[in-house]
Image (cartoon, helix red, strand yellow):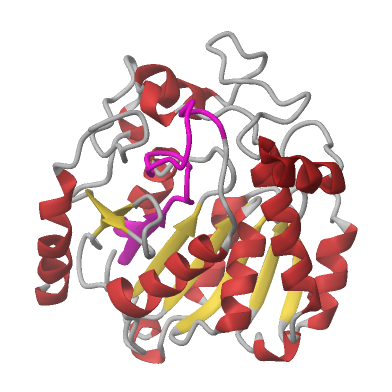
Amino acid sequence: MVRRAAALALLLPLAACGRGGERAPFTDSRLPPGLAQSGWPPAGWAWGLIQIRNDPPQRYGLAPASDIARAQVLILPGYGGLAEESFATASDFTARGYVVWVLEGQGQGGSGRFVTPRDLGYVRGFDGDVGSIRQMVNTAIAPTPAEPLVAIAEGTAAPEALRAAQEGLPGVSSLVLTDPRFWPPGPPVDPGKARWMTRLGFGASRAPGQKPWRRDAADPDTVLHDWQTANPDLRMGGPSYGWIAAFDDLIGQMQSADWRRVTLPVLMLETGPTDQVAQRLCHLMPHCRIQPTTDVHAAEVAAIEARLPATSLSNPSLGR
């Protein structure tokens, strides 16, 4: 309980941060009309900001465990994802006795932006994202054996988490990659062309075929679209040349690094056909396996429970 209060005390001074310009971080999201209560923020939810050097601040959120904390979970949304999308999952996690953290990427969700328009995906590189993951783990979360930390990276956040693991994530007990993706979202864009256009000064231009956010998007993700409709600051369209070039650089750095340093258990959850890159990378890691699933949430819970200390497992009433 003391630890939970300390964490909240750290966050609350930041939670009032609102919009001070089109590039500023946004931590004052409004509930979409008609949103089911299951999608509301978990009890005790608070926003915070983390900043790497002079990069725009990144938004993160924290929900304390409903009772004695048994574990901690760090969720990393993929491109265009929001912490708000994780509210239902976070509520279930906190009811199970997990402290939940959600860290959005640079230039994503409610994080600050490098450029305008606000819905344009752009970064100068992914060192900041990788650094913020490591800083969150080492400084803000500071996991302990009594409250092990499982990191869950979704979609395009998977390469960021793997790169962070290569550089060192002490205290993380396991890494779960949910539908890991090693290519940019949207229509294919030649990374070589993206890199060349970036060098010519067009890095902040949206790549061909990539579209701005649209209210009438065909078959939108309902929860994501509802939050973005109610909160224009959270909208994301397709990525820029610069984002695509930086992501390709990240993939190159990750693939050429020493995989022997990734000693923590890695679980790749796949809801569809397994990507060949994912298969190849999993074979390079000492403790990695791929698991097809039709119930991502149940698989994530099982992965978290597998890392709990024996004292917690011996008393199932904890956190229930």
Residue 130 in the image: state x and y as whole percent. Answer: 53, 67
Region of the chain picked out in magenta, as a range: 93-120
Q: Height in image: 218 above or below 63?
A: above
- Magenta stretch: dominant SS? loop
Q: Does the magenta run of residues contain 308?
A: no
Residue 69 in the image: state x and y as whole percent. Answer: 26, 72
Residue 241 in the image: state x and y as whole percent. Answer: 70, 39
Left or right of 305 in this view: 147: left
Q: Height in image: 218 above or below 161?
A: above
The quarter holding residue 319 reads bottom left
Residue visible at 60% across and 85% down in the picture? 264
Q: Nearer the viewer, residue 122 or 137?
A: 122
Which residue lies most toward the front here? 200
Residue visible at 55% across and 38% down in the picture? 80
Q: Quadrant of the C terminus?
A: bottom left
The quarter holding residue 204 reads top right
Which residue lies most toward the top here? 216
Instruction: Say whether residue 179 is visible.
Output: no
Instruction: Say whether residue 50 is visible.
Output: yes
Q: Nearer the viewer, residue 8 or 241?
A: 241
Residue visible at 37% across and 39% down in the picture? 110
Q: Nearer the viewer, residue 71 or 206?
A: 206
Residue 28 in the image: state x and y as whole percent. Answer: 23, 34
